Image (cartoon, rainbow, N blue to C red):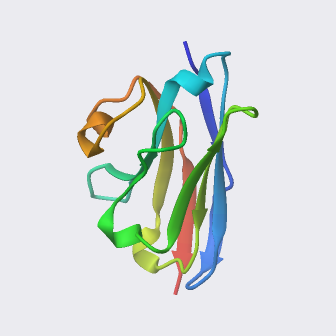
Amino acid sequence: QVQVVESGGGLVQVGGSLRLSCAASGRTFSRYSMGWFRQAPGKERELVAGIGWSGGSIYYEDSVKGRFTISRDNAKNTVYLQMNSLKPEDTAVYYCAARFGPSGNRRFFDVMDYWGKGTQVNVSS
């Protein structure tokens, strides 16, 4: 069992930055691949970025490439999402999720085992 808790959301102006954190419980965090997802009002939830259990196999959704960076610190049981050059279309609830396994490609993140409750990100124009 893994519990994940997101933090770091808030209100930011266009072009600004935020860093989201996801703290995970459990001693097997290093055996889980982690993903950041988001859901905007009226839209389906989408994968934003994913990272394999060793920190490799990193994936980014096209619209965030070059602006967002996913990273993890297995010693701290934490995964991060650094978001720069934020745009109004980045406004959404951001969720952290975990899946057991090393990951391999984008489709690995289609099914996740554990989800957080989300943190709201609002980008004002």
Instruction: Say how many tags the image has.
Output: 0
Q: Nearer the viewer, residue 13 or 83?
A: 83
Residue 25 at x, y percent in the picture = 67, 22
Q: Nearer the viewer, residue 79 or 58?
A: 58
Q: Which residue is at a point 48% across and 44% down the rendered structure image?
A: 56
Residue 82 at x, y percent in the picture = 61, 62
Indicate the quadrant where residue 105 lies.
Answer: top left
In the image, farthest residue toward the right: 76
Indicate the quadrant where residue 12 lies.
Answer: bottom right
Q: Nearer the viewer, residue 69 or 116?
A: 69
Left or right: residue 46 versus residue 38 is: left
Residue 110 at x, y percent in the picture = 27, 37
Q: Which residue is at a point 53% across and 22% down the rendered structure image?
A: 31
Residue 26 at x, y percent in the picture = 66, 17
Q: Which residue is at a point 49% across and 51% down the rendered structure image?
A: 94
Does residue 45 lie above or below 99 as drawn?
Answer: below
Does residue 53 lie above or below 96 as drawn?
Answer: above
Task: Kindly tell me whether residue 42 is visible in this rendering.
Answer: yes
Q: Nearer the viewer, residue 19 or 65?
A: 65
**In what quadrant of the picture does the N terminus appear?**
top right
Q: Which residue is at a point 53% across and 36% down the rendered structure image?
A: 117
Task: Kindly tell me whether residue 36 is visible in this rendering.
Answer: no
Does residue 100 lie above or below 34 as drawn?
Answer: above
Indicate the quadrant where residue 78 lies.
Answer: top right
Does residue 65 lie above or below 24 as drawn?
Answer: below
